[in-house]
Image (cartoon, rainbow, N blue to C red):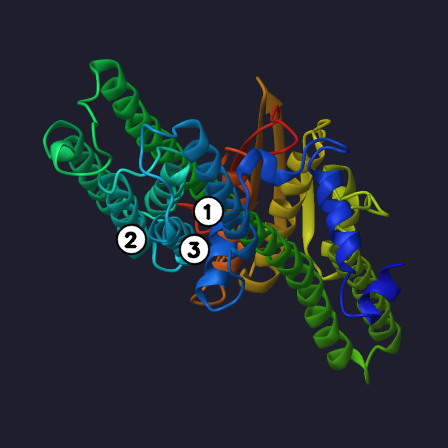
Amino acid sequence: MDEQRAGRGGPPRWRTHRADRHRAGGDGPPSWWRHGPPWPARRRDEERGGRWPWRSTALLTVFVVMGSNFAAHAQEGERAELDPFARVLLLTASLLLLWRLRYPVLVVFGTAAATAVYLGAGYPYGPVFLTVAVACFSAVVAGHRRAAWTALGMLWAVHLLVAHWLYRWLPPSGDTRPSIGQEIVVATWVVVIVAVSELARIRREQWARERAERAQAARRRADEERLRIARELHDVLAHSLSVINVQAGVGLALLDTDREQARTALTTIKTASKEALGEVRQVLDSLRTPGDAPRAPAPGLGRLPELVEQAARTGLTVEVEGEPPRLLPGTDLAAFRIVQEALTNVVRHSGSRHARVHLEHAGGTLRLRIDDDGPATGADAGGSGNGLAGMRERAAALGGTIEAGPRPDGGFRVLAVLPSKVKEDQ
């Protein structure tokens, strides 16, 4: 299955969607239900000349025209009849909504102006106000709040001017001043439009922040995973290659004088390289099948005897004081890698052929102390920057500390303090 997917350039879209649905919680609601619909992506596509809101605009136009005809029959004798000019105003206010995603400011002022003229001409009250509400909603959600509020304020001002002063000279004849109850209804209508638009804007900004936070968290997890893999490969390869380098030198030096010892060195090189390849393959397998369980257990302090044996093949004698405690897998792996890196540094950078590993476990804390008697054989004695940095990163990931530096008697010491009771996800 993995080979088939790799050969086809990645998983098909339906498989990816199914996997996302599974990660989101089985048959539960899709991710957009919790984090919001992809409005910004759709809006960007539309602004680039892609889709237009034809369907919603057509439905709104039909609703406004038919609803206004029904309102004209219901208000016959009270308001002016719908003439061709009134129908032009209704179509103008409705069809302007086709550009509401591209030019929200112009659309909200255009619909407000068309509706104001419609009201001033004394035509029947009806769903023409819906066009202003939709345009205002689009403008506020797009971030043009002041433009939307100004357009609504302009429309309300025109309504007050016509309803309380100009009604004497404007159609229909015999019109009267509206009551306080009618003005309360109009004011409530305006407040509802503004409130709904602002709530939609706030919710959209919240969805955008959540998407940005999820993307940042995904990038952070990817960075942490890359760092973990790089650290794991460094520890595996640095130790094994150090053993191989030392034994290769021994084999070359003794090839003509002591063939049996040279054979032993070559056998050590073969064993070390085989172990290194196995551990590298295990790390790479975790990349190919991230959802599967590892095929081999991660190394831990239980493999200290193997580490001591590998060091002995390079001529380094290691004494282990204390018994390895039972630890969680993450802590056990970190402790093993710290000891491995410390012994590798002794082989590479110390003139001593003797090292001591002391383990102490008490009070929920594991103390690892690795000492050698020196002297240092290079300017980077004690280890390279990457090795010590990797040890510190492993300890810090568990909430522990690493102290490394020369001892007063000329040797070098690495002291690691790790909490032995930590959660698995740490």
At mark 2, the secondary structure is helix
Cα separation, mark 1 vs mark 3, equals 35 Å
In the image, 291: left or right of 395? Answer: right
Q: Quadrant of the N terminus?
A: bottom right
At mark 3, the secondary structure is helix
Q: What x and y, as percent, mark residue 34?
A: 57, 33
Q: Viewer-proximal residue, 146 or 398?
A: 146
- Residue 52: tell me if it is visible: yes
Amino acid type of the residue that numbered disc 1 sits on in the rendered structure = Ala
Q: Viewer-proximal residue, 170 or 354?
A: 170
- Of callouts 1 and 2, which one flags the residue occurring earlier in the amino acid sequence? 2
Give the mark toward the camera: 1 or 3: 3
Q: Is residue 261 above or below residue 132?
A: below
Amino acid type of the residue that numbered disc 3 sits on in the rendered structure = Leu
Q: Which residue is mark 1?
A: 212
Q: What x and y, as percent, mark residue 49?
A: 48, 69
Q: Which mark is residue 95?
A: 3
Q: Residue furthest left?
A: 165
Q: Quadrant of the C terminus?
A: top right
Q: Which mark is residue 150?
A: none
Cα separation, mark 2 vs mark 3, equals 10 Å
Q: Which residue is mark 2?
A: 110
Local packing at callout 2 (Cα closer than 10 Å; few below 14, some 14-19, many 20+) is some
- Residue 413: tell me if it is visible: no
Q: Are marks 1 and 2 in contact (CB under 8 Å)?
A: no
